[in-house]
Amino acid sequence: MTVAVETGTWQLDRTASTVAIRHRTMWGLVTVKGAFAAVSGQGEVRADGTASGVLTLDVATLDTGHAKRDKHLRSADFFDAERHPEITFTANEARPGGDGTVRVDGRLTVRGVSRPLSLTATLTDVSGDALTLDAEFTVDRARFEMGWNQLGMMRGVATVTASLRFTRAAG
């Protein structure tokens, strides 16, 4: 089943969208979870059904529920929010599958380092004027020059979970 989405410009609904991360730390014994409070973006659906767009996260809004940890995550050891205040994902092409999935190919930029990223999202809750894309994928933080690992506490990859609600832009 292919879901048709209207062509044109779509704007991210900031209040109905979430981007969260989780990472196992303390030698795999503790899972740290956090979310970005400020997320923005937009996309363009083309006549052939493919799409492109950009998603931006404000690094300073990362909240794990622990102020000291959040300050450390924003430091040069991790996200370096002072020098690199945003994380961006530029979707060069999003192509719908026949099963409600969307194959997304793009570039993720963290700390000024840009790497290719491909993922599969699920298109949910589609209407003429709104849609939601849900995705979960992993990111190897070492690929973005985040190698801080005191006493070997942090291993593996971070998992990113996104639920992105878009509405048709007026016009």
Image (cartoon, rainbow, N blue to C red):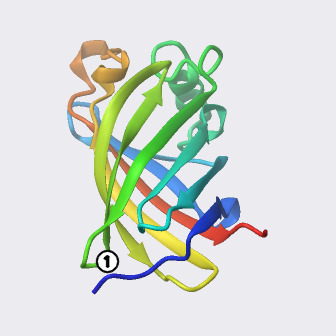
Residue at point 59%, 85% (across, down): 128
- Report the side of 27 relative to 121 (left or right): left
Q: Position of residue 64 (x, y in %)?
A: 53, 43
- From the viewer's side, name the closer residue of 93 and 161: 93
Residue at point 25%, 79% (across, down): 99
Pick out the residue farthest to the right.
171
Q: Eyeballing the image, is 77 above or below 167?
A: above
In the rendered structure, which amino acid carries the disc numbered 1?
A: Gly
- The crowd level at tag 1 (other Cα within 10 Å; few <14, some 14-19, many 20+) is some
Q: Position of residue 53 (x, y in %)?
A: 53, 50
Residue at point 21%, 33% (across, down): 156
Q: Eyeballing the image, is 103 above or below 31?
A: below
Q: Position of residue 84 (x, y in %)?
A: 59, 20
- From the viewer's side, name the closer residue of 40 and 46: 46
- From the viewer's side, name the closer residue of 97 and 64: 97
Quarter placement of the N terminus: bottom left
Quarter of the image where one finds residue 121: bottom left
Looking at the rendered structure, the number of numbered marks drawn on it comes to: 1
Quarter placement of the C terminus: bottom right
Q: Eyeballing the image, is 72 above or below 133?
A: above
Q: Is residue 65 visible?
A: no
- From the viewer's side, name the closer residue of 63 and 165: 165
Q: Position of residue 167 (x, y in %)?
A: 65, 71
Q: Is residue 155 visible?
A: yes
Residue designated by label 1: 100
- Report the side of 156 relative to 91 (left or right): left
Q: Secondary structure at mark 1?
A: loop
- Report the side of 42 relative to 31 (left or right): right
